[in-house]
Structure formats: C-alpha cells, structure tokens
Image (cartoon, rainbow, N blue to C red):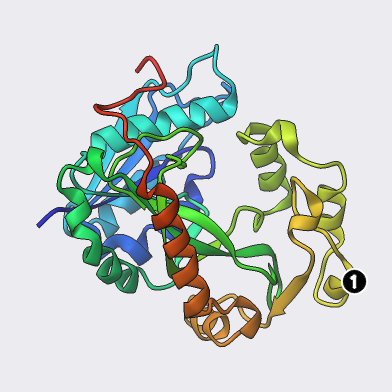
Amino acid sequence: MKKIQVGFLLSYDYEMLKKSIPPVYKMADTIFLAVDKDKRTWSGNHFEIDASFFQWIKEIDVDNKVVIYEDDFYVPTLNAIENDTRERHMLALKMGIGNWLVQVDSDEIFIDFEKFVKKLRKYDSFLINPEKHPIQIAGFHVNVYKYLDKGMLYVEKPSKFLLATNYPNYKYAKNTKERIVYDDAYVLHEGLARTEEELRMKLANWGHKHEINATFLDKWLMANETNYDTIKDVFYLDADTWPELGYFPSSNLEDLKKLVYENPKLELPKTKLFFRNFGQWFKHLFKKKKQGYESYFNL
C-alpha cells in the first residue's frame, strides 16, 4: 500500500511541534522534519533549536518513524514566500512522489487524523500516475485567535486550507493550483495563539510579513473573554476576512473535539462540500495537463 507521508517544517517555533506531531504519529508511515542546515528562516534570520527538543523526538518516536531532513532551504535572492514554496517543494520530493504527501505546519493540530486518513485512502487510485491526475486535499482550519487563562478565543468561521497532494508541484506555499477535493477534516490552527514575543517573531519572519495590516496587532493585544464580541475584523491581512470571534471555555484537545463538532457556526454541511467538490471536478475536467515534472526553482 502507498504510504501516508507527513512533513513538518522545523524552524524557530519548533516547540509547537510537541502539540502537532503526536496527533498524527500513529497513522503516519513516516514523519519528516525539514530544517535548514544553517538554521535560517525564510527571511535569512538565524535561530537555535535546543537539544532537549531532539531528545523529546527520540522519546516519542517509539516506532522509528521520524526522519530529520536537513538541506539548504534559504536562497537570498528569493523573498520569504518564495523560500517557503521552495522548501515545501524540496520536502515533498524527499517524502516521495507516489505516496500521499501531507504537509502540516507546526501550528496545525489535527482533531481526528485517523478519520482523515481513512477518507484519504478512498482516493488511492490517484497515486497511480499522479502527474496525469494531480489533486489536492483540503480541510478546514478552526483558527485559534488567542489562548486565555481558562479557555481560548477562536474565529467563528472555518477557513479552507490545503492538507495533502499526490503531486507536489507547488506554485505558492502548499498550493499546486490543481483540482481540490474538500474533506470535513478540522484542524486547530494556532498561527496566532502564541505569546506576544512569539507572535512578534513570527510576524517578522513570516512569508506574508509584507501584507500584514496595521490594525491587527493592537486588536490581538486587547482581546479577552469579556470584550471579544465587540472586536470585529481581526484577520491579519484583509481584516474583514475574519469578522467575529468566539470563545471556548477550554483549551483541552479532547474537550475541543466536542466543542468544535457541536458548534453550528463551524458546521460544514455535506451539501456544501458536495457542490464544492463537483465544481472542482467540472472546472478541471477539460484542463490540459502538462506532461512531466515542472520545477519552479533551481533546487
């Protein structure tokens, strides 16, 4: 059977992997951790990884699934998002075309990876000659806005994001711009759920740093469990993309599974998924496929 290969990018926020690796460990065949050989971010800034992290990896890797992949992932002539795309491209090649290539960021925590893998296996036929039938599998983020003492603020609107592909010809970050198959897989996205110091560091090194809106950080700093419903338009790029916040009275993953699936504002109707997938199938039905592997970078 073709493998479920899961890849993470190992960078300055490596501590977050302690929450994102365990939920996928059991069902993954191999877990790849890609890290720049000189410990540089996509913007060229240097970072350090404490030795205790690699000791943690040894302790949790009871089935010897984890592979550390070191390479030169920083090119000074490319901007941050181009280096982002290039690293994902290189990581995917390392993971091996012909398998399911799942790329999960350190700030993404699967709520039910086993359920996702079972659905993914229904599309195994796309792993035969994948270059002729490239697809992407998308899930939905439950965006954690901010952790509080007794719970968390989240965005009351799930957002689609790309999870896996059979053919990793990435054009922009994880996007291959091929046909998308939508699945009702929920993933907690902790992109903003950090300390102020950690968030400022992320914003300074992020691939989208040149697009961040001027009101974002002030709103994030002031938001709490008593005023969240008065703070509107909180997205870091186009602010009105995230119009409202909600509050969960727990940050425990087991509690959140129930809270997320029972929340009507986060519900994904089956009819909506059906028409999205039908639309994607029809859109790409007559699209002419390029032959051969197409690289956008000098690797």
- Estimate the x, y position of residue 122 in percent, counting from the top left: 23, 67
**Which amino acid is tagged 1?**
Thr
Query: Element under label 1?
Result: helix
**Which residue is identified by label 1?**
230
Q: Nearer the viewer, residue 104 or 269?
A: 269
Return the residue nearer the eye: 9 or 241. Answer: 241
**Looking at the image, which residue is at 24% across and 27% down?**
292
- Look at the image and tell me whether residue 25 can be seen: yes
- Of residue 104 and residue 156, the one placed in the foreground of this image is 156
Q: Quadrant of residue 267?
A: bottom right
* 48 up-or-down from 20: above or below: above
On screen, residue 107 versus residue 228, left or right, reads left
The residue depicted at 38 percent of the width and 24 percent of the height is 37
211 w.r.t. 137: above or below: above
Residue at image point 24% right, 61% down:
123
Q: Residues within 10 Å of mark 1 (few under 14, many from 20)?
A: few
